[in-house]
Amino acid sequence: MLSFALRRMLAAVPLILGVATLVFIALSLVPGDPALIYLRPGVSPEVLERIRETMGLDDPLGIRYGKWLWAFLHGDFGYSHFYQMPVRARVLAALPNTLLLASGALFLSFLIGVLVGVLQAVKRGSLLDSVLSGVTLFFYSIPSFWLALMLILIFSLGIWGGPFSFPVSGSTSPGAALLSPWDQLTDRLHHLVLPTLTLTLILTGGVARYVRTSMLEVIQQDYIRTARAKGLPESKVILKHGLRNGLIPVVTLFGVYFPFLLSGAVLIEVVFAWPGMGRLMLEAIHSRDYPVVLAGTFLFGVMVVLGNLLADLLYGVVDPRIRERRG
Amino acid sequence: MKRSLSFLLFFALSTTACVGEPGDGSGVGLQDAFCGPAMARVDSFMATFAGQEPVGERYGGTVVLGSLGDVSGMGPGDAISVEAAQHQQFLNFMTLIEFDENLEPAPYLATSWEISEDQTELTFHLRGDVYWHDGERTTAQDVAFTYLTVINPESEYANPGYFQAYLPGEEGVEVVDPLTVKFHFNPHADILETWRNLSILPHHLLGDVPTAELARHPFGGVCPVGNGPFRFSSRSPGDSWTWEANPAFPEALGGRPYLDRYVYRVIPSHTTLMAELLAGGVDVYIQMLPNHAVMAREEPSLRVPTFPYPSIFFVAWNSRVPELADARVRRALTLGINRPQLIEGIQRGEAILLNSGIPPVHWAYDPTLEDSLRYDPDQARTLLDTAGWVDRDGDGFRENGDGAPLQIDLVYNQNQERQQVAEVMRVQLQDIGVDLRPRVLERMTYSGVITSVEREFDGALVTFETGFRIDDRDLFHSEVRDGFYAFSGTVDPELDRYLDTLQLIPDWEEALPVWQAYQLRLLEVQPYTYLYSALRRNGVNRRLQGVAMDTRGDLASIRHWWTDPQSRRTP
């Protein structure tokens, strides 16, 4: 399995480089001059010219590409003029925040989504099935930023009035570094609640509906009937024989959601002022911070490949036939 | 699966492990080599004040200020951004002088100054009790170094033009003794204004850094060692900056600030900012939306300081296109726009009508001009008729003698205020037979369109933060008609004369009549339709005391901010 994973990773290298190259070309074709972000009276054209120069924008496209590729292959992602720091440091400041948020939401949404989907499939046509369908469809359909604002209204601005109150935004409280390690951890978790809840609710709906459909197909199969005829308890029939087969298509969904969470949670990160990759990319695109955009694109490419690889490996876990074929 | 997760973890850890390798070309190695020792010296100097904390109920607490965008850094090149400039000027560093509440120059790093009678020399006498946050004393050498750095375009300092009248290079500055520095220049306007803006840099830390490398030096973005009332503590890029009180700040200037800590938080959504202010997560919300200000004024726990600010909002008319070449047409357009209605409807009355690029807070602002070119559609129609634009085919829009329609393309970048203004203008100008066509552009594309030599626009909605030093030569002087900022491209010898003269008169009394004549001439030429100068609205939690936000800036009084001990945020 390790050699399979390595083969897949190596095969992805030209793909990721190709994507980054396409993005580089696309960015250079976008109208507007990145140095113009500093446009205001008194800023002399000489200074703007100097900024263009330090951004490397006065070179022809081919030379710029060559310089970028050479540095890139040597692990130098360049310098962010907007943040006044090396791109790698800037990306590494944002990446852990996104990974934390995304992994939590991904875990919870699959956990809850699978449970709800299985329950719906087992209780097909019941009142419970209808209610859960309504709820999951509701969360699946509403805009994420609206849900985020509603959760802030309910849980942060005191409309709920319950015993818990969560911070409106941010990943830590101001001055959190001065707290004890335990308090820092609880502070961090406290800040994670609302963004994770929003993402989880949005994603769970999709997972649950997917699992429900998949399980409905599976539990009508002959081998399930055979398992029941053997006299196995219903829980064993569903969990051992049904779920294992029902999860195979869900693994594909995991492969798709994994990179989406890193790049697609932009609105959640903006509403909750969560300092992650989505927000960084949005700001970088707005300010034409090309080195950051390119590094982010590279990272997203890696995540797509990793997501698909994880999905492929998970196929092997849930389906022994695939494992044997690779082995 | 376990193996895959291990791979992911390995990837994340190996990427992290790369940070800080010396000479990796990304600047991370330099960051560690410079910032580590520099911040260690700061910590060590600050530690010498342990146990000497002043006693009093005002001392202590943390204040959080929320704003939409990040502060890019504390380097000289970062002063280009208003937020960065404020934090440099009022927190991290010191300027030679500051303005008091009446905008009169007051001593700060300099205890006194003299301008020679012939207006060619300015001598500053510095305080002897100002220390850099690492313990080195601030001297005249630092001031001279700062000056020589910023006049070099390689430093990427935004406004080297401030020093245009100074003698070139090292001839412009003279270190008389460790606490006295003298500048040499030709007579010019606003001699002191420059020194209110310019934050002094530490020569002992940056003296060996080539100027061309300063803009990318970690000093600005990672470890800015200053000498101001607050010392830099930490930065989480894209998220927050934290400063702590500087216990070594001179007693004569108020000593250590009351606050223990000041945090600048980036919150990229107005709605979240408002929610944070209501929930108490931030104490100050900078530049509130008008509807949020209305909401905040109804909240007993909040107040909304509202004050004039040196910013202007205008429509630049491109006189290079035939439709707008005639000043009568441009004046008619101004007369056809109901600007008081725009102020009432869009800014909820919280803006001041403008008729020139001089904001109301500037000493040369002429309030008598406020009634000029007031909304008068009848006069606008007459002017257009006289200029040869009449509705010849009865479609409601005017054409010239050749049948070309009076169609004007108005560009703006995406922003709710501009979108509303453009739409209201379209309807109002339709009433006088002008076919205004608003066109929204992405921000950088918009900047490219209005500054390019081709100038592919007819009108453009523009906002400028002017500061207190006004020099419109880049905008209107015929010598720079193809220049970057010559949006309008009008050519008027009389305007040229005023523009040349104004920058040479140091004395305000002598300059005032020229400024007035200049503004009257602008009304005639009308390269722009000046719309208004919006008041600045900040939401402030009432537990925060001693806040005097005014024209000088949101943070001008931060040394005197303190929080109510009963509701104080700690740590």
Image (cartoon, coloured by chain):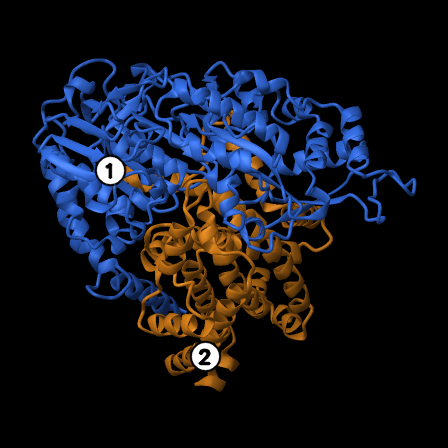
Chain colours: A orange, B blue
Of the 4 image quadrants, the one containing the C terminus of chain B is top left
Along the line of sight, which residue is nearer the eye, A269 or A231?
A: A269
Residue B132 relative to residue B193: left or right: left
Q: Secondary structure at mark 2?
A: helix
Give the x, y percent position of residue A106: 49, 55
Q: Dot 1 surroundings within 10 Å: few (below 14), some, or many (20 or more)?
A: many
Give the x, y percent position of residue B541: 42, 20
Q: Is residue A175 above or below residue A5?
A: above
Residue type (three-letter) at the residue carrying disc 2: Pro
Residue tagged by mark 1?
B232
For the question of whether residue A107 can be seen, the reply is no
Disc 1 to disc 2, C-alpha distance = 44 Å
What residue appears at the point 55 percent right and 40 percent down from the top-left corner? A148
Quarter where residue B280 is shown: top left
Residue tagged by mark 2?
A14
Q: Residue furthest right?
A: B394
Give the x, y percent position of residue A19: 50, 72
Residue A84 relative to residue A256: left or right: left
Give the x, y percent position of residue A152: 52, 34
Q: Secondary structure at mark 1?
A: strand
Chain of the residue under the numbered disc 1 shown in the image: B
Quarter where residue B352 is shown: top right
Residue type (three-letter) at the residue carrying disc 1: Phe
Chain of the residue under the numbered disc 2 shown in the image: A
- Count all numbered tags in the image, as a single digit: 2
Q: Dot 2 surroundings within 10 Å: few (below 14), some, or many (20 or more)?
A: few
What residue appears at the point 45 percent right and 33 percent down from the top-left corner? B466
Residue B470 relative to residue B355: left or right: left
What residue appears at the point 26 percent right and 35 percent down from the top-left corner? B185
Along the line of sight, which residue is nearer the eye, A108 or B371?
A: B371
- Which numbered tag is attached to residue B304? none
Quarter where residue B250 is shown: top left
